[in-house]
Image: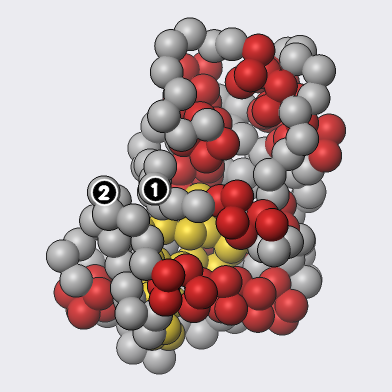
Amino acid sequence: MRSPNFGPRKDGLRPDLIIIHYTAMASADGAIRHLSDPAAQVSAHYVICSAGRVTPLVDEAMRAWHAGAGSWGGEADVNSRSIGIELANDGFQPFSEPQMTALEGLVRGIMARWDIAPEGVLGHSDVAPGRKIDPGARFDWRRLARQGLAVWPEPGAPGDWLSDLHRAGYAVDAEPEVLLSALRLRFRPGAAGPLCDADRAIAAGLAAQFPARPARRA
């Protein structure tokens, strides 16, 4: 493996999440160099370039340093329970077909190896709302969901949307406007304005159909 920036998973945690990022850098090679630089103190398990080449950087069994501060389902150490995938993209360009095809194959294999459910495939923006926005509004989550590689909820009856999002896994200490932005970025990209029933319905669907599971420990 290329990156020295990893360590053991902590507190008996084992992978039950896959976190998708974009590199926000000019090239995949530049991102690989950065993620392999000891001084940077960041890494990911894989980088996928726009041509679909998959570069492994950290063994899946180890804890890569990709998620930083954040949480999911009440568990703050996201790195210890996740596998991180970086897509070479600046956040403004569409993700190429070869890149998406390679991502789908990689995610499918990781899910099988670690018995990860579709609701465990998340964006960096899900686990670090307000701090991160990747993989961003150009990422096609619905495409992954159609293949069982992520989730896309059926709208539910609008209710207490904050409680619903917390039940789905989102951080309980995040401000409501931050959570609304994260929800829309993932499920209603381009939506704007005050909270509405469409937002509440998605949150209700997430809570009912895909509640967060307890972190998995060895």
Q: How far apart are marks 2 and 1 (CA)?
A: 7 Å
In which quadrant of the rendered view does residue 201 lie? top right
Q: Please report the residue visible at 61 percent of the width from the left and 21 percent of the height from the top.
A: 199
Q: Name the residue under label 1.
A: 138
Q: Please report the residue visible at 52 percent of the width from the left and 31 percent of the height from the top.
A: 188
Which amino acid does the dot numbered 1 rest on? Arg
Instruction: Inspect this view and state whether residue 64 appears.
Output: no
Measuring from the top left, give residue 195's x and y in whole percent: 54, 11
Report whether 153 appears left or right of 17.
Answer: right
Report whether 164 appears left or right of 69.
Answer: right
In terms of depth relative to the viewer, which is nearer, 141 or 23?
A: 141
Where's the C terminus, which quadrant? bottom right
Tally of numbered tags: 2
Measuring from the top left, give residue 134's x and y in whole percent: 39, 49
Which amino acid does the dot numbered 2 rest on? Phe
Q: Please report the residue visible at 67 percent of the width from the left and 39 percent of the height from the top.
A: 169
Measuring from the top left, give residue 173's x and y in whole percent: 55, 25
* Secondary structure found at label 2: loop
Q: Which of marks 2 and 1 is nearer the N terminus?
A: 2
Report whether 177 appears left or right of 90.
Answer: right
Q: Which mark is residue 15?
A: none
Q: In the rendered structure, are the residues bearing label 2 and label 1 in contact, judged by CB atoms less than 8 Å apart?
A: yes
Q: Name the residue under label 2.
A: 92
* Secondary structure found at label 1: loop
Dot 1, how many residues are within 10 Å of its Cα: few (below 14), some (14-19), or many (20+)?
Answer: some
Measuring from the top left, give residue 69's x and y in whole percent: 43, 46
